[in-house]
Image: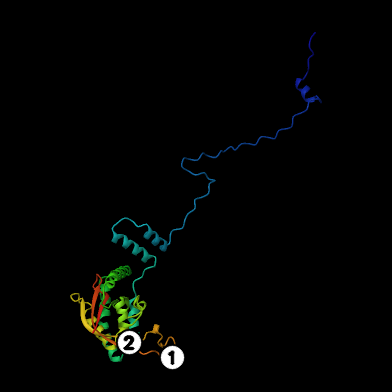
């Protein structure tokens, strides 16, 4: 017996109501025709965040970095780099001697006679142009003056040891008179607290009688630029427990006081010598004085 023939074998599967049709599949997502190019070796993928860019350090920060992590070199070379960096940061400035001369002028106006004032101004009128002439001839810049100030600070440290071993009253001051260091014996000699004899709070001429101050400035003017003569031996009269603005005396800035100021307890006659220390350009930067009570 022959098998039956079917006209369309596919239609049997499709049109048969007893065969369940499978669910329709979603259409395939078309693939990107332009695939992302492969990153070259060493390059970061585009989706990574950009690196954080730190701001450049300020001049002050550069100074701290220079001081904390010093470059190789000799001690003086490293010190010069630190000082220059500190100067560029604005943390180190040369000493302003103009203010020192202005302070001296105010003291003369209030405390000495016109005749004594002219005697003091005469050597100063010669010295100050010499200072300016040296500065111009040597083409000194602010950084040069800073290094001179650094040498002054080194001398202060050296005299710490000297004064601690001396039993003779001694102190040192700038060329404009501001006292920056004194030993205990000198503080006891003039009856002034040691705190007032540091960092320019008092001037040497403020502790002298009028005639002694005139004598000092005249002798200082004669040897200030004489490199062959460093020390001068003379005499002076110091004021014991002088009236100072910090001691409660009446000053124009503080107005009137109902209590009268205390009287000075007297004067002290001394043998007095002073030695001038000069910078590499021959300008006096520090004067050391020794006093012996007569």
**Outermost residue, right side:** 17
Q: Position of residue 117 (x, y in %)?
A: 29, 88
**In this figure, which residue is indicated by the disc labeled 2?**
108
The secondary structure type at the circle numbered 1 is: loop
Q: Residue at x 39, y 84 (%)?
A: 247
The secondary structure type at the circle numbered 2 is: helix
**Would you say 266 lies left or right of 245 here?**
left
Above or below: residue 7 compared with residue 48: above
Based on the displayed image, in which of its 4 quarters is residue 33 positioned? Answer: top right
Q: Number of labelled discs? A: 2
Identify which residue, 160 or 137, lies in the foreground. 160
**In this figure, which residue is indicated by the disc labeled 1?**
259
Identify which residue, 172 or 62, lies in the foreground. 172
Q: Quadrant of the N terminus?
A: top right
**Would you say 135 lies left or right of 11 here?**
left
Q: Do we see residue 177 in this rendering?
A: no
Q: Who comes first in sequence, dot 2 or dot 1?
A: 2
**Outermost residue, left side:** 228
Given this view, does label 2 or label 1 mark the residue nearer the observer?
A: 1
At label 1, counting other C-alpha atoms closer than 10 Å, the crowd grade (few under 14, some 14-19, many 20 or more) is: few
Distance of label 2 from label 1 (alpha carbons):
26 Å
Above or below: residue 6 compared with residue 292: above
Based on the displayed image, in which of its 4 quarters is residue 257 positioned? Answer: bottom left
C-beta proximity under 8 Å, tags 2 and 1: no
At label 2, counting other C-alpha atoms closer than 10 Å, the crowd grade (few under 14, some 14-19, many 20 or more) is: many
Identify which residue, 220 or 289, lies in the foreground. 289
Q: Position of residue 239 (x, y in %)?
A: 31, 86
Based on the displayed image, in which of its 4 quarters is residue 8 positioned? Answer: top right
Q: Position of residue 205 (x, y in %)?
A: 30, 83
**Would you say 220 lies left or right of 27 here?**
left
Q: Position of residue 134 (x, y in %)?
A: 25, 74
């Amino acid at each position: 017996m022959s098998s039956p023939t079917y006209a369309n074998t596919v239609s049997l599967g499709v049109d048969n109501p007893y065969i369940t049709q499978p669910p329709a599949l979603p259409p395939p997502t078309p693939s990107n025709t332009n695939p992302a190019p492969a990153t070259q070796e060493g390059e970061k993928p585009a989706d990574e965040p950009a690196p954080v860019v730190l701001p450049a350090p300020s001049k002050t920060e550069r100074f701290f970095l220079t001081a904390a992590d010093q470059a190789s070199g000799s001690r003086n070379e490293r010190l010069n780099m630190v000082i220059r960096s500190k100067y560029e940061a604005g943390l180190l400035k040369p000493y302003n001697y103009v203010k020192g001369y202005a302070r001296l002028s105010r003291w003369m106006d209030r405390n000495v006679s016109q005749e004594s004032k002219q005697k003091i101004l005469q050597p100063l009128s010669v010295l100050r142009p010499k200072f300016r002439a040296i500065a111009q001839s040597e083409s000194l810049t602010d950084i040069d003056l800073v290094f001179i100030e650094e040498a002054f600070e080194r001398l202060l440290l050296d005299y710490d040891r000297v004064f601690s071993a001396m039993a003779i009253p001694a102190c040192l001051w700038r060329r404009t008179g501001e006292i920056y260091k004194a030993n205990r014996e000198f503080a006891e000699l003039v009856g002034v607290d040691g705190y007032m004899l540091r960092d320019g709070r008092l001037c040497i001429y403020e502790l002298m009688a009028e005639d002694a101050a005139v004598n000092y400035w005249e002798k200082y003017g004669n040897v200030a630029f004489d490199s062959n003569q460093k020390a001068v031996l003379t005499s002076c009269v110091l004021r014991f427990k002088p009236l100072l603005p910090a001691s409660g005396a009446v000053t124009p800035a503080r107005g009137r006081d109902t209590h009268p100021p205390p009287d000075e307890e007297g004067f002290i006659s001394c043998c007095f010598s002073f030695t001038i220390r000069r910078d590499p350009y021959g300008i006096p930067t520090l004067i050391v004085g020794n006093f012996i009570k007569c």
